[in-house]
Image (cartoon, grey):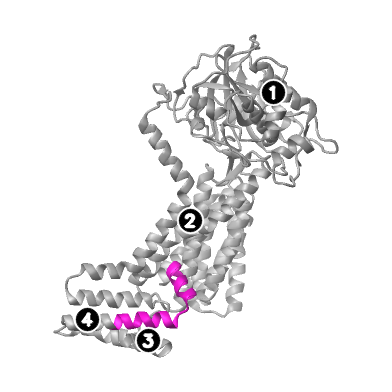
Amino acid sequence: MAVPYNLLRTVLQILLLVVYGKYLEDVLSFPFLAVAYLFSLIMAWSLASFRLRGFFSGMILLLWPWVVRGVVLLIQQVRPSFLQISFDMNFYFVLVPVYLFSITTWIVLTYRRFGRYEVLLNGLLIFLLFLSQGNYRVTIVPEPVWLAVLALLFLILELLVLYMAVAGERSLIKSPGDVLREILPFFILLLPLLVLMLLPLWKEYEEGSVAGGGGLLKSSLFRFDFSEYIKLETEISMSDDLVLMFRKEGPAERLLLRRYVLSGYEEGQGFFRHEKDRINPPDKVPTRYTEYEDPAYRNREKVKQELFLVNIDPAAFLSLNYPVNVQPVYNWDDSSFVRIYQSEALVNTKPVREINPSVEMAPPDAEHYTYWGDSLAIGKLARDITENIPGALLKTAAIERYFHENYYYSLKPGVAPDGDQLSWFLGETKKGYCSYFAFSMALMCRSIGIPARVAVGFWVDPDVSVLNFYPVRADQAHAWVEVYFEEYGWMEFDPTSSTMYPGEQYPFAGFSIEEFSSLIEEILDNDLVAENLAEPEDTAPQNSGGNAAGEQILRFFRVYWPFLLGLIYLGSLLIYHKACRILFFLRRSARGKAKCIYRELRHLLSFERKPFRETIGDYGGRVDRIYGFTFSQVTSSYQKSLYSRHFSQADLELMAEQRAAILKEYREILSPGRRVLHFVLPFARSL
């Protein structure tokens, strides 16, 4: 028991040490930290072996680092070198982990009950170390997902150490076989249970992060990205964190970096990413050079763009209107960026000269892109605005202009009395943030037969640039409208008002060249080398039945994965609890079946654990005395199957009757709530 328990404790301490070392890697030598940690363990184990009184052990643990420093000073006096300077540069930084791990290790080895409290202390420390990884800026690991893996690993180890500490106090683990028998079910069943327990908190955190990200950005696994389901929040806040650096070469004037398009709509809920939106444009940065279909729309010119991601999902692909290719770029050592890539996009650069360009599309698509629910107020307002205006283009422009002239921008749209935020915005308050404007214009266009969808991404200020670099902050997250014209493609319209609601102030941060000069200098000092150069990958959409079926399967798993995880956990429980019963029917010999019956009942009564040195006969008698069971009779039959020359079918039938009697006693003595708890949390029985 002691060896695996202390091994897990050491692994936990090393994880904490690695995180601590990553924070101080610029000023602290990791080999020095590792040697100091090794000496602290040796000192703690030595003092615990000598069994000195607590006062003397505590004084030695406090003073030994300073004794080592004194020895270094004496050596420096005899043979001057840079040893003392190097030692002192690291000494004061390692004092905290040295004191912490040496003292806690000595206390655990001396006072076994402290083991459960050490787990709480480690949890507090990892929380404090991870606290600075806020705002989704990860510094201690290369990729945010590794931070999530590290946190999950730490949590699992913490729970295992806690379980083994309590089990060790109760003398439940004495051999390697006991370790496997006790820990393996705990480990197998713990992971899905943890996920199920965290699902409500995760969902609540994600929903809250959307409001904290301007109504568009959400957090997930220590990073953030745009939400695929946009609804209207009653109040939002804005962050001025730098998200990316953007550079372009070309004639684009309106700089809208699109992340997602949202064409699906649910009345009363909001816009969401539909399957049609997942084919084109792309949503992830490919691993090599990739080309996309050129739609050959009119009035478009090619614009070269470079994106340097700082504080967003590294796989996020952002681009101006119609990307036609993308090339990932190698990231250099000690880079300030999580991902770099180049791309070319076709951008609308000339005004549409036609008064009434066609909006025709295939009937299924037309039905999808013109669905707007049954809001009479939206339809009436759209008709009132466009009644005497000819052509789809001019009607669309009139709706856009109507919002510019009659509505206000606000971060506090307020709560609609009837819960209908959109109608309240249109008819009463006339104030909201970009999602309110985009939702309203898209639905109004749809109500008069013009295909429209919502796009989300970043608005880039064309007046703020240094050497053609544009900084993009989180508070520039934006939603706008894209309207379809047959020969011109999806064209951008931005209905959001630039007039702030009276009494509110715009929260956007001011621009400072000094703030971004180091990043620009870093980019200019490094060559952009194309990554994974190969033949272009053809990603033109294939409308095959297999792809459609695959999309349906993926959508099913995306929607119902919590239920699937719950079923997997339930299935694991059934197999764990009924394994002996299943083996009973598979065994042919009477002795083998008797062994299965005994193992099944031992598992059922595992809330009263059998210490290592207790015989099975004494254990059966103790269970009978404490709970009033007849378990000793089953124990006698089981011993007969083990040691008697004759164990017949009649003996097996008698044992089966004894099993039935114990099952009845089990249901009478234990409450339903406790029986359910033992079934759902089998690894917590001994706790």
Residue that badge 4 annotates: 653
Q: Which of 181 and 419 is in front in this view?
A: 419
Relative height, residue 262 to residue 393 (above, below): below
* Local secondary structure at mark 4: helix
Q: Nearer the viewer, residue 619 or 150?
A: 619
Q: What stretch is highlighted in magenta?
A: 658-687
Q: Are marks 1 and 4 in contact (CB under 8 Å)?
A: no
> Which one is closest to the eye, mark 1 or mark 4?
4
Gap in Å between the C-alphas at discs 2 and 4?
A: 47 Å
- Majority secondary structure in the magenta region: helix
Residue at 53%, 77% (x, y): give it.
Answer: 111
Residue that badge 2 annotates: 153
* Local secondary structure at mark 3: loop
Q: Residue furthest top?
A: 353
Q: Nearer the viewer, residue 559 or 255?
A: 559
Instruction: Name which of mark 3 and mark 2 comes first in the sequence.
Output: 2
Residue that badge 1 annotates: 466
